[in-house]
């Protein structure tokens, strides 16, 4: 009888304590569980190394396992939607880019999310694009390039690594700014664009710095100008468009981390702290150097969101000028 009473009391106490436990206790598995970094490209794509380098360092700071989940498709649209559809419980980050955050919301008219559904954690790395040419092009600077294109009306095109990207829109600006008639040659990724530029199948285009840099240094491509505000240390002899008098071509490609709006503030603050430490680490920076990327992890949430919204209006204007419509 006494044993039965003891069992009853124990069960009653267990139920009582469970009922009185704070609601946050149910979040404990999320607090100690795996964190995912969602990447909107295939494994091995240009975003993947960034996510893995940063995720590895952040996992040590946070004391949590971080895994990379690739959700490629539609220029990052599928990965963004996936993150927005998940619970905002502090177990997921998303690798956002300039094109995904600044351009996609402008050119896609039927998105089920807006930029305000996301909260920036950090702008991680950035790099300019470089206007490059094949060595068979006789022009060695911007003035000569413009003159050469004008001397060959209707015969030439500019290569972009994808429609609806800075690479495509800056090519359009080249046409309008200098009165050119370059055709748009569209590629599905910076890899194919680079391959055809090096092979001479495409003679000029705005390229990712990391892709173009080895070929520029080996003489297989020529660099005309870069789109950064100041010269990049990776190609110190190449002028900027700004110093040539065309600061409207200034544009920086960047990668960073964001989370879904509603993510608990303690989780956001922990992510910000870990992300800043990762981007400040000399070993991490050296890995970014190989890709021609400059670590800028000090750019925090408020400034990054303000920059995104400012640039959205710039790309909206260019998209309207080109008549570009995303499917």
Image: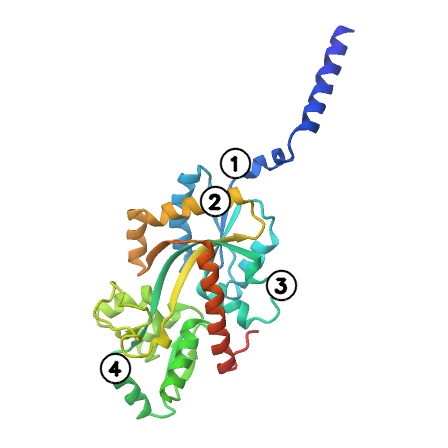
How many C-alpha atoms fall within 10 Å of the one at disc 2: few (<14), some, or many (≥20)?
few
How far apart are labels 1 and 4 at the CA level?
A: 57 Å
**Label 2, label 4: how far apart the Cα atoms are:** 52 Å
- Could you tell me which secondary element the residue under label 2 belongs to? helix
Side of 303 relative to 152 (left or right)? right
Residue 132: x %, y % from top left: 30, 75
Q: Which mark is residue 32?
A: 1
CA–CA distance in space, label 4 to label 3: 46 Å
Residue farthest along the right direction in this orientation: 1
* Residue at x 52%, y 48% (from the top left corner): 92
Cα separation, mark 2 vs mark 3, equals: 27 Å
On the rendered image, what quadrant is the C terminus found in?
Answer: bottom right
Q: Of helix, strand and loop, which one carries label 4?
A: loop
Residue 112, numbered label: 3
> Do the residues bearing badges 1 and 4 touch, measured as CB atoms within 8 Å?
no
Asked if the residue under mark 1 is in contact with the one under mark 2, i.e. CB atoms within 8 Å, the reply is: no
User: In the image, which disc is placed on residue 269?
Assistant: 2
Q: Are marks 2 and 4 in contact (CB under 8 Å)?
A: no
Residue 97 lies in what quarter of the image? bottom left
Residue 136: image tag: 4
Can residue 244 be seen in the rendering of this structure?
Answer: yes
- Quarter of the image with the N terminus in it: top right
Name the foreground residue: 133 vs 146: 146
Q: How many C-alpha atoms fall within 10 Å of the one at disc 3: few (<14), some, or many (≥20)?
A: few
């Amino acid at each position: 009888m006494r044993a039965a009473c003891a069992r009853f009391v124990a069960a009653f106490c267990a139920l009582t304590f469970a009922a009185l436990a704070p609601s946050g206790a149910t979040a404990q598995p999320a607090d100690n569980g795996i964190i995912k970094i969602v990447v909107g490209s295939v494994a091995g794509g240009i975003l993947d190394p960034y996510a893995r380098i940063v995720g590895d360092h952040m996992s040590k700071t946070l004391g949590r396992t971080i895994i990379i989940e690739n959700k490629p498709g539609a220029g990052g649209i599928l990965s963004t939607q996936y993150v927005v559809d998940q619970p905002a419980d502090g177990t997921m980050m998303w690798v956002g880019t300039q094109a995904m955050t600044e351009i996609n919301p402008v050119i896609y008219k039927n998105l089920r999310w807006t930029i305000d559904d996301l909260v920036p954690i950090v702008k991680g790395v950035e790099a300019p694009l470089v206007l490059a040419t094949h060595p068979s092009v006789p022009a060695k600077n911007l003035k000569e390039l413009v003159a050469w294109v004008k001397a060959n009306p209707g015969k030439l095109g500019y290569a972009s690594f994808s429609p609806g990207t800075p690479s495509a829109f800056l090519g359009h600006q080249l046409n309008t700014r200098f009165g050119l008639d370059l055709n748009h040659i569209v590629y599905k990724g910076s890899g194919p664009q680079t391959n055809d530029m090096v092979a001479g199948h495409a003679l000029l285009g705005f390229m990712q710095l990391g892709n173009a840099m080895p070929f520029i240094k080996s003489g297989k491509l020529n660099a005309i100008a870069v789109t950064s505000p100041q010269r990049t240390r990776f190609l110190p002899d190449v002028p900027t468009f700004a110093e040539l008098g065309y600061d409207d071509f200034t544009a920086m490609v960047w990668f960073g981390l964001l989370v879904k709006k509603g993510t608990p503030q303690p989780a956001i603050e922990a992510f910000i702290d870990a992300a800043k430490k990762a981007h400040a680490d000399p070993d991490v920076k050296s890995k970014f150097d190989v890709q021609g990327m400059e670590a800028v992890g000090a750019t925090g949430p408020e400034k990054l969101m303000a920059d995104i919204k400012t640039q959205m209006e710039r790309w909206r204007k260019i998209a309207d000028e080109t008549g570009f419509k995303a499917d």
